[in-house]
C-alpha cells in the first residue's frame, strides 16, 4: 500500500493491533473530555458552550461505537491491507474534526487542549507517508489560521475559556497562531525525518537479510545435491542386502542372515534421516511463493498420510487411530502438510513400543484447524518441549533409545 | 512372462532391482540412457517401464522421457523411480508428472511387485 508509511507497511499484522489501541485510546479521550467538562462546570463554574461541547463529545462516542462495531464485530479484528489504510484515514479525519470542534467551542487558542494536535501529527507521521502528513499539517494550519482570522474580524463568534480574557489582541492572536503553526510544522518535519531514517536502516537490514537468505539457499541446495548422491548408493546397498537375504546370491548361514538384517535396518534408518534432510533442505531452499495453497478436505490429507505410515505401524505393532469431522476443510499447501503430518506420525510410531497407540485428531478451533498427534511412546521431557522445533533437535530419550537399538540391533 | 524395462544410469540399481525382479519371475531388460530406453520401447513395447529421473546430463531428464514415452504409448504402465524421495524437489507437482506411479528408491521387493501386479 503506497499511502502507508513504509515502516508500518512492513509490519502489516501489527497494524491490526494499532487499531485496537486507537479505539481504546479514543474511549479514554471520551471519558476524559466528559470529566473535564463536568469539572469545568461543577467545580470551576466556567461558562462554556456545554451544549455544543456535549454534542461534539457524543459525536466522538458515536464515531467510536461505529469504529468498534466495524472492527470487532463486522471484521472480527482483522482487516486487509487496503481496508486498514482506509480505516485509519476515516478515524484520523474524524478525530481531527472532533478535536477542532472541541477546541473551537472551548477557547480555541486559549485552550491547552490545542496541543493535542501535536500528538495527532505524530501518530499520522507514524502511519502515513510524508506526503499525507504534509497534507494533514497544511490542512490543520489553514483551519487554525482561518478560524483565528475569522474570529479576529468577528465573522465567527469567539467562545472564550475564561470570560475575562475573551478579546485577544491582534498581535497576541497572530503570535499564538503563528507559533502553534510553527510547532505543527516542526513536529511533522521531525517525526517524518525520524521515520525516514528508521526506514532507511530497515531497508539496509533487508538487503543484509536477503544476502543471508541467498547464502542459506546455496547451502540448502548443496545439502539437497549431496543427500541425493548419498541416497543413490544407499538404495543400491539396500538392494544388495535384499538380494542376499532372499538367497539370490546363494544359500546363507543363519548368522550371516542376522548380520545382513542388522545392516539392512541400519541402512533403512540412514535413508530415513537423509529423507528428512532432503525435506528440510527443500523447504529452506524454496521461495515461499512456490508453496501454492488451496482449499482441501482435511480427511483427504489425513487419509493420504495414514496410508503412507500404515505398513510401518503394522510392522511395529502400533495401533493407529484417526478422528476428523467429515466436512472440515483447510487452505494449505499439500506438500508441506504431508511433510509435517508424515514426520509427526512417523516419529510417533518410531518411538512407541509394540502394542501402543498413535492417534491423529483434527478439529476446528475458530478460524484454525488443530491437528493433534498423540502417542503412548517414550514422550518428551518437559524441559525439552520448547526445543522440539529446533533444526535437527533430537530429545534425550530418543537418543538413548537409538543407542539401545544400535547395541541390540533392534529395528 | 511379463517383461519389464529398467531405465537407470546407476548400474548397481539395475543389477539389484533387475535381479530381484528376475527372482520374482519377471523378464528384465535395461538401458542406462533415456535415448537407448526409448529406442528399445519403440523396437518392442515392454509390459512396464521403471524410469529414473536424475541422469548425469540433466537433473530432470526422466520427466522429459516420461512425457515422451506416455505421448507415444499412453497405455504403457510407467513408474518413475528416483533417489530423491519427494517429487516436489524437482519443482514438479504430482499432476505434472506423466507417470502411473512415483516410487522412492530404495523400494522393498514385495512392495514393488505388489505395485507392478496392479498394472500387469
Image (cartoon, coloured by chain):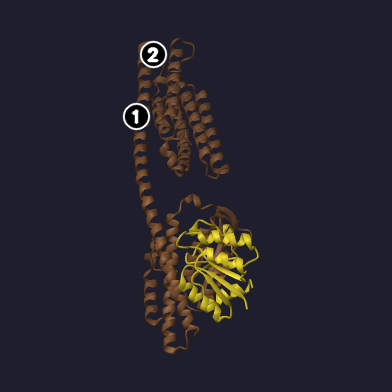
- Front-most of B31 and A160? B31
Of A238 and A29, the residue lying toward us: A238
Q: Is residue A378 visible?
A: no
Chain coloured yellow in the rendered structure = B
Return the x and y of residue A62 as percentages of the image width and height: 55, 33
Q: Which of A250/A409 is in front? A: A250
Q: Which quadrant, please, contains the C terminus of chain A?
A: bottom left
Residue A320 coordinates in the image, percent (x, y)? 55, 72
Q: Name the N-terminal-most of marks 2 and 1.
A: 2
Q: Chain of mark 2?
A: A
Please name the color used to draw chain A.
brown
Residue at the disc numbered 1? A190
* Residue at disc 2, secondary structure: loop
Q: Chain of mark 1?
A: A
Residue drawn at the location 42% of the way across and 56% of the way down: A284
Q: For mark 1, give the secondary structure.
A: helix
Q: Furthest residue to the top?
A: A153
Residue A278, x across and y down, in percent: 44, 62
Check disc 1: other Cα within 10 Å, few if <14, some if 14-19, many if 20+: some
Quarter location, residue A219? bottom left
Q: Is residue A187 above or below residue B40?
A: above
Q: Which mark is residue A281?
A: none
Q: Tell me the distance, in whole angstroms, between the alpha carbons under discs 2 and 1.
A: 31 Å
Query: Where in the figure is residue A174, as x and y percent of width and height?
Result: 37, 14
Q: Which mark is residue A168?
A: 2
Disc nearest the viewer among 2 and 1: 1
**In the depicted view, which residue is nearer to us: A312 or B21?**
B21
Amino acid at each position: 500500500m503506497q499511502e502507508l508509511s513504509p515502516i508500518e507497511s512492513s509490519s502489516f499484522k501489527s497494524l491490526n493491533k494499532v487499531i485496537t489501541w486507537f479505539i481504546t485510546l479514543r474511549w479514554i479521550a471520551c471519558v476524559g473530555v466528559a470529566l473535564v467538562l463536568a469539572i469545568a462546570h461543577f467545580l470551576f463554574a466556567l461558562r462554556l458552550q456545554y451544549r455544543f461541547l456535549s454534542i461534539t463529545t457524543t459525536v466522538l462516542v458515536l464515531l467510536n461505537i461505529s469504529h468498534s462495531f466495524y472492527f470487532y464485530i463486522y471484521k472480527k479484528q482483522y482487516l486487509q491491507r487496503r481496508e486498514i489504510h482506509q480505516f485509519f484515514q476515516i478515524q484520523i479525519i474524524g478525530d481531527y474534526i472532533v478535536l477542532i470542534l472541541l477546541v473551537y467551542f472551548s477557547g480555541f487558542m486559549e485552550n491547552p487542549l490545542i496541543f493535542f494536535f501535536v500528538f495527532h501529527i505524530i501518530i499520522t507521521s507514524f502511519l502515513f507517508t510524508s506526503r499525507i502528513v504534509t497534507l494533514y499539517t497544511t490542512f490543520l494550519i489553514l483551519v487554525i489560521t482561518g478560524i483565528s482570522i475569522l474570529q479576529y474580524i468577528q465573522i465567527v463568534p469567539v467562545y472564550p475559556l475564561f470570560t475575562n480574557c475573551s478579546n485577544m489582541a491582534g498581535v497576541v492572536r497572530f503570535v499564538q497562531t503563528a507559533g502553534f503553526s510553527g510547532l505543527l510544522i516542526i513536529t511533522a518535519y521531525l517525526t517524518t525525518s525520524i521515520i525516514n531514517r528508521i526506514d532507511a536502516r530497515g531497508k539496509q537490514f533487508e538487503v543484509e537479510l536477503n544476502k543471508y537468505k541467498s547464502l542459506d539457499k546455496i547451502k540448502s541446495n548443496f545439502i539437497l545435491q549431496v543427500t541425493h548422491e548419498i541416497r543413490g548408493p544407499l538404495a543400491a546397498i539396500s538392494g544388495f542386502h535384499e538380494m542376499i537375504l532372499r538367497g539370490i546370491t546363494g544359500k546363507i548361514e543363519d548368522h550371516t542372515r542376522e548380520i545382513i538384517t542388522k545392516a539392512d535396518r541400519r541402512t533403512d534408518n540412514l535413508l530415513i534421516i537423509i529423507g528428512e534432510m532432503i525435506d528440510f533442505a527443500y523447504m529452506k531452499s524454496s521461495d515461499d511463493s512456490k508453496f501454492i495453497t488451496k482449499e482441501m478436505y482435511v480427511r483427504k490429507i489425513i487419509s493420504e498420510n495414514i496410508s503412507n505410515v500404515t505398513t510401518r505401524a503394522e510392522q511395529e505393532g502400533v495401533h493407529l487411530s484417526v478422528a476428523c469431522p467429515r466436512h472440515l476443510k483447510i487452505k494449505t499447501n499439500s506438500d508441506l502438510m504431508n511433510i509435517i503430518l508424515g514426520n509427526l506420525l512417523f516419529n510417533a510410531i518410531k518411538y512407541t513400543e509394540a502394542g501402543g497407540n498413535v492417534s491423529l485428531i483434527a478439529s476446528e478451533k475458530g478460524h484454525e484447524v488443530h491437528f493433534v498427534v498423540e502417542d503412548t511412546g517414550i514422550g518428551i521431557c518437559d524441559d525439552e518441549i520448547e526445543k522440539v522445533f529446533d533444526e535437527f533437535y533430537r530429545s534425550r530419550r530418543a537418543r538413548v533409545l537409538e543407542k539401545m537399538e544400535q547395541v541390540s540391533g533392534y529395528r | 512372462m511379463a517383461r519389464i524395462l529398467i531405465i537407470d544410469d546407476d548400474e548397481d540399481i539395475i543389477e539389484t532391482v533387475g535381479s530381484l525382479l528376475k527372482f520374482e519371475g519377471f523378464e528384465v531388460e535395461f538401458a542406462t540412457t533415456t535415448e537407448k530406453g526409448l529406442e528399445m520401447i519403440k523396437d518392442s513395447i515392454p509390459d512396464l517401464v521403471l524410469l529414473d529421473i536424475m541422469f548425469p546430463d540433466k537433473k530432470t531428464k526422466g520427466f522429459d522421457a516420461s512425457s515422451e514415452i506416455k505421448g507415444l504409448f499412453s497405455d504403457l504402465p510407467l513408474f518413475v523411480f528416483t533417489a530423491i524421495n519427494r517429487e516436489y524437489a524437482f519443482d514438479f507437482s504430482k499432476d505434472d508428472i506423466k507417470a502411473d506411479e512415483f516410487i522412492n528408491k530404495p523400494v522393498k521387493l514385495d512392495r514393488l511387485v505388489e505395485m507392478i501386479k496392479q498394472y500387469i
